Image (cartoon, rainbow, N blue to C red):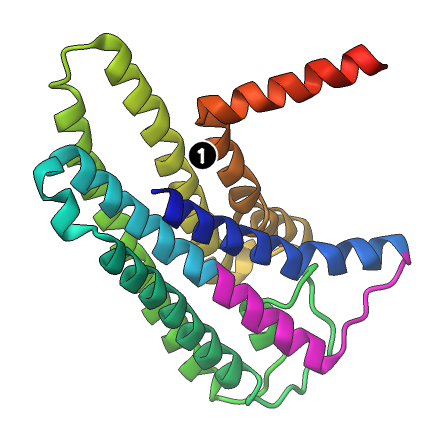
Amino acid sequence: MFFFLLNLALADLGSICTTVPKAMHNSLWDTSNISYTGCAAQLFLFMFFISAELCLLTIMCYDRYVSICKPLHYGTLLGSRACAHMAAAAWASAFLNALMHTANTFSLPLCHGNVLGQFFCEIPHILKLSCSNLYLRELELLVFSFSLGFGCFVFIVFSYVQIFRAVLRIPSEQGRHKAFSTCLPHLAVVSLFLSTATFSDLKPHSMSSTSLDLSVSVLYSVVPPALNPLIYSLRNQELKAAVWRLKTRWFQKH
């Protein structure tokens, strides 16, 4: 689990660093410019880290399922080599997905201006600037990606149903509470991420507005990566104790 948490932390950090620093720079300097190459790089990195995050969340759910529902097979199914292979597969799949979407999106001719109604380069807003019928090819890729994402979500929900059934058989009330308090926030973050991303990219044009698009994009691109460290790291008792000691020392010095 800690190995996958490390990979998830890298994906979260990369996702935040891809969009937020540029948005902060534009806000502080009262500008809204980004180069064509910079937009392509931002789109590729964002798709790469977001795709990796979804794959890693799915793998972590499988790790939790095996550890709770099939503990005797854990060493066989999730040894160090198997974990490394699954993490490598997640990053490789994310790279191919990001490369495919970026190459396809930026191969389209743009004839409706060069202004994006968003705080970062996002595929649906770039497609609005295209005047080519080839954008249908990118829409097909988006539908395919979201189908895979929905498949991951179904797998996570099914796994958690089995996990909750196993947890309910735990005789200790404290043990059940600890398991539920750890699983439910993770499931909530996954649900928030997938629902807002799907709504942002597939919502009808009649519902489009600058403020709504901005709010939904912030929800799925910034909020889940920011919440993941709180959900996972702060549930570690040793980390809580270390943070408390640092806070106590700081107040004592000041």
- Residue toward you, 215 or 228: 228
State whether residue 113 appears in this view: no
Q: Is residue 24 left or right of residue 186?
A: right
State whether residue 217 appears in this view: yes
Tell me which residue sits at (78%, 13%) in the image. Answer: 251
The 10 Å Cα crowd at callout 1, few under 14, some 14 to 19, many 20 or more, is some
Residue 26 at what x, y percent from top left? 83, 59
User: How many marks can you see?
Assistant: 1
Task: Read off the magenta span.
Answer: 29-49
Q: Is the magenta stretch mostly helix, strand or loop?
A: helix
Q: In which quarter of the image is the N terminus?
A: top left
Tell me which residue sits at (23%, 58%) in the image. Answer: 82
Residue position for label 1? 232
Tell me which residue sits at (57%, 84%) in the image. Answer: 106
Q: In this view, does 169 lie to the left or right of 130?
A: left
Please name the amino acid that badge 1 sits on: Tyr
Residue 143 falls in image quadrant? bottom left
Q: In this picture, is 4 found above or below 185?
A: below
Residue 56 at what x, y percent from top left? 37, 53
Indicate yes or no whether the magenta region holds residue 42.
yes
Residue 174 at what x, y percent from top left? 28, 10
Residue 28 at what x, y percent from top left? 88, 53
Residue 114 falls in image quadrant? bottom right
Q: Is mark 1 on a helix, strand or loop?
A: helix
Tell me which residue sits at (61%, 23%) in the image. Answer: 243
